Image (cartoon, rainbow, N blue to C red):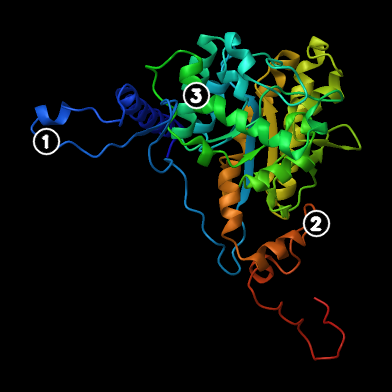
């Protein structure tokens, strides 16, 4: 399907669903009584079941979520790429809406890690009780009515297009003196519960009771997260496992096939080549920036285009290394930001357009990747994990994943191998 057709189809579906939700927002069951009786047709079963105060709703299975399939014996695995966003929210930059369009145009879905306080108005800030901090504290502030309305609109549309809504928690506390790295398992459970609560009660907290709900049950939708500043992973994972989450992406890995860690899929970001340097770089905009302009978010204007190209080329080198090698999923993390003139957002635009349209590539959310991993033969995954970074199976993919022993070399048993 052409890119413009994909956009049109996605927009049409989202618009239709949003209209249906808006029509149900003021009811208690989600039905529009009388509409069909007047037309002489029987009233349909309600497609929307509001949850709690109507901030969220059960609307059935998520659209555009592909059914995962197990690899057939000898089948080469697809190349997965995950684009994910920390602290997802819509502000004046309109980057959330921008990357939804980029994803649609390139047949991709993504994961948006929502910060719960982005759905909490400033005048209700004391509803947030962060661990080891006073009520109403937050390193990233809170939101206003327009910001909440715009963010909810993007969350709603993103989910209807098949994207995933995860969490980046709430106050984004890093470092010592109460940072997330010091939090206990119980404190993480409190933070997770509050992140869910702000999503499940945004209409009440923001006094928007007539607005359309988010079209998902967040208790079921939320299956994974990335911790602020990649800190506190150990205790978070313990809390997450007890609460039934399925994956974490708060660590740093090499480009190898994922495995489970403490009962969760470890889908951490990865190290990829850093053009012009001998060391490798984490697949995140913030880390590229720190290694280019230090703590200055707006460094030398003359270098900004080069810095963006450096990030783009590093991610593409990492992609090529996997695509032509061990086919390990490539995990990329970013923020909706304008650091160094927005050069890193331009880089992501170009990476999405470059990789998501290649044969056998699937640009997916973490949920979709975890679903696919869950249905694979454990023996197959073990074999894949045995491949090093960029390593191609010596006997070829068909033999490597055939489920049978590799064929014996040609020649007389016990004799030296024949030269080609």
For the residues labelled 1 and 2, the Cα–Cα distance comes to: 62 Å
Number of other residues with Cα within 10 Å of mark 1, as a class: few under 14, some 14 to 19, many 20 or more: few
- Mark 3 or mark 2, whichever is nearer to me: 3
Left or right: 216 as drawn, with respect to 113: left
Q: Which mark is residue 201?
A: 3
Task: Give the mark nearer the N terminus: 3 vs 2.
Answer: 3
Q: For residue 122, which quarter of the picture?
A: top right
Q: Nearer the viewer, residue 344 or 172?
A: 172
Q: Quadrant of residue 293?
A: top right
Give the quarter of the figure containing the C terminus.
bottom right
The label number, if any, that marks residue 388 in the structure image: 2
As displayed, is residue 227 above or below residue 79? above
- Regarding mark 3 in the picture, which secondary structure is present there? loop
Secondary structure, mark 1, is: loop
Dot 1 corresponds to which residue? Answer: 41
Residue 221 picture location, percent across and down: 52, 39
Toward the viewer: 319 or 156? Answer: 156
Q: Position of residue 405 (x, y in %)?
A: 70, 78
**Quadrant in the rendering for residue 225:** top right
The residue depicted at 38 percent of the width and 41 percent of the height is 60
Give the residue drawn at x 66%, y 77%.
404
Residue 171 showing in the rendered view = yes
Residue that extends furthest to the left in the rendered view of this protein: 40
């Amino acid at each position: 399907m052409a890119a413009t057709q994909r956009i049109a189809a996605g927009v049409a579906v989202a618009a239709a669903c949003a209209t249906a939700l808006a029509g149900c927002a003021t009811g208690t069951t989600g039905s529009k009584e009388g509409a069909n009786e007047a037309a002489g047709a029987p009233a349909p079963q309600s497609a929307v079941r509001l949850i709690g105060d109507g901030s969220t709703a059960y609307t059935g299975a998520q659209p555009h979520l592909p059914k995962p399939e197990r690899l057939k014996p000898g089948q080469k695995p697809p190349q997965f790429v995950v684009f994910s966003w920390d602290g997802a929210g819509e502000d004046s930059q309109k980057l959330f809406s921008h990357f939804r369009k980029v994803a649609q145009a390139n047949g991709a879905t993504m994961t948006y890690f929502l910060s719960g306080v982005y759905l909490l108005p400033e005048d209700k800030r004391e509803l947030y009780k962060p661990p080891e901090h006073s009520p109403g504290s937050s390193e990233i502030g809170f939101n206003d009515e327009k910001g909440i309305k715009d963010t909810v609109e993007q969350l709603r549309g993103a989910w209807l297009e098949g994207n995933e809504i995860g969490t980046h928690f709430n106050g984004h506390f890093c470092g010592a003196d109460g940072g997330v790295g010091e939090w206990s398992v119980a404190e993480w459970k409190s933070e997770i519960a509050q992140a869910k609560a702000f999503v499940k009660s945004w209409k009440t907290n923001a006094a928007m009771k007539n607005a359309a709900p988010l079209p998902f049950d967040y208790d079921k939708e939320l299956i994974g997260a990335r911790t602020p500043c990649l800190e506190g992973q150990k205790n978070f994972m313990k809390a997450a496992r007890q609460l039934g989450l399925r994956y974490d992406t708060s660590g740093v890995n090499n480009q190898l096939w994922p495995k489970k860690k403490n009962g969760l899929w470890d889908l951490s970001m990865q190290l990829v080549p850093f053009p012009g340097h001998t060391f490798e770089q984490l697949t995140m905009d913030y880390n590229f920036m720190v290694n280019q302009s230090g703590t200055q978010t707006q460094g030398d204007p003359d270098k900004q285009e080069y810095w963006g190209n450096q990030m783009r080329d590093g991610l593409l080198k990492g992609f090529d290394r996997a695509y032509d090698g061990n086919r390990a999923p490539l995990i990329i993390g970013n923020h909706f930001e304008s650091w160094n003139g927005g050069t890193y957002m331009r880089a992501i635009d170009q990476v999405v357009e470059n990789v998501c349209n290649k044969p056998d590539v699937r640009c997916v959310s973490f949920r979709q990747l975890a679903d696919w991993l869950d249905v694979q033969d454990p023996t197959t995954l073990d074999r894949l994990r045995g491949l090093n970074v960029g390593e191609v199976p010596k006997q070829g993919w068909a033999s490597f994943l055939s489920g049978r022993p590799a064929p014996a070399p040609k020649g007389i048993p016990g004799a030296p191998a024949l030269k080609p």
